[in-house]
Image (cartoon, rainbow, N blue to C red):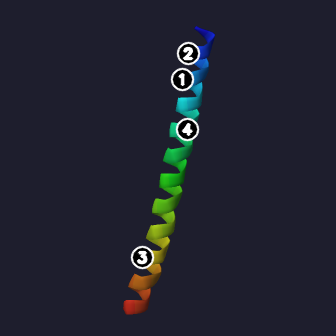
């Protein structure tokens, strides 16, 4: 039971980290896109 709980917790943490990294990447892409858009105008 304890081993199973630990596995779920690690999985949850891994998913959370992946989600945060994805959100961070989206922000960086948006910033880069905004810069390109302003340069084109």
Vertical side of 33 occupied by 9: above or below: above
Q: Which dot marks residue 4?
A: 2
Q: Earlier in the sequence, mark 1 or mark 4?
A: 1
Q: Nearer the viewer, mark 3 or mark 4?
A: 4
Residue found at x 44% / y 69%: 30
Task: Check contact, mark 1 vs mark 4: CB within 8 A.
Answer: no
Q: How many C-alpha atoms fall within 10 Å of the one at disc 1: few (<14), some, or many (≥20)?
A: few
Q: Which dot marks residue 14?
A: 4
Residue found at x 49% / y 54%: 23
Task: Check contact, mark 1 vs mark 2: CB within 8 A.
Answer: yes
The residue pinned by badge 3 equals 33
Q: How many C-alpha atoms fall within 10 Å of the one at disc 3: few (<14), some, or many (≥20)?
A: few
Vertical side of 2 occupied by 9: above or below: below
Quadrant into which the C terminus falls: bottom left
Q: Nearer the viewer, mark 3 or mark 1?
A: 1
Q: Earlier in the sequence, mark 3 or mark 1?
A: 1
User: Going by the image, does 7 lie left or right of 30?
Assistant: right
Task: Check contact, mark 3 vs mark 1: CB within 8 A.
Answer: no
Q: Nearer the viewer, residue 15 or 34?
A: 15
Coordinates of residue 15 in the picture (x, y in percent): 50, 38
Vertical side of 8 occupied by 20: above or below: below
Question: What kind of element bears circle 2?
Answer: helix
The residue pinned by badge 1 equals 8
Quadrant into which the N terminus falls: top right
């Amino acid at each position: 039971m304890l081993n199973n709980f630990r596995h779920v917790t690690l999985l949850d943490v891994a998913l959370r980290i992946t989600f945060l990294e994805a959100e961070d990447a989206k922000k960086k892409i948006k910033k880069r896109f905004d810069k390109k858009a302003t340069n084109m105008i």
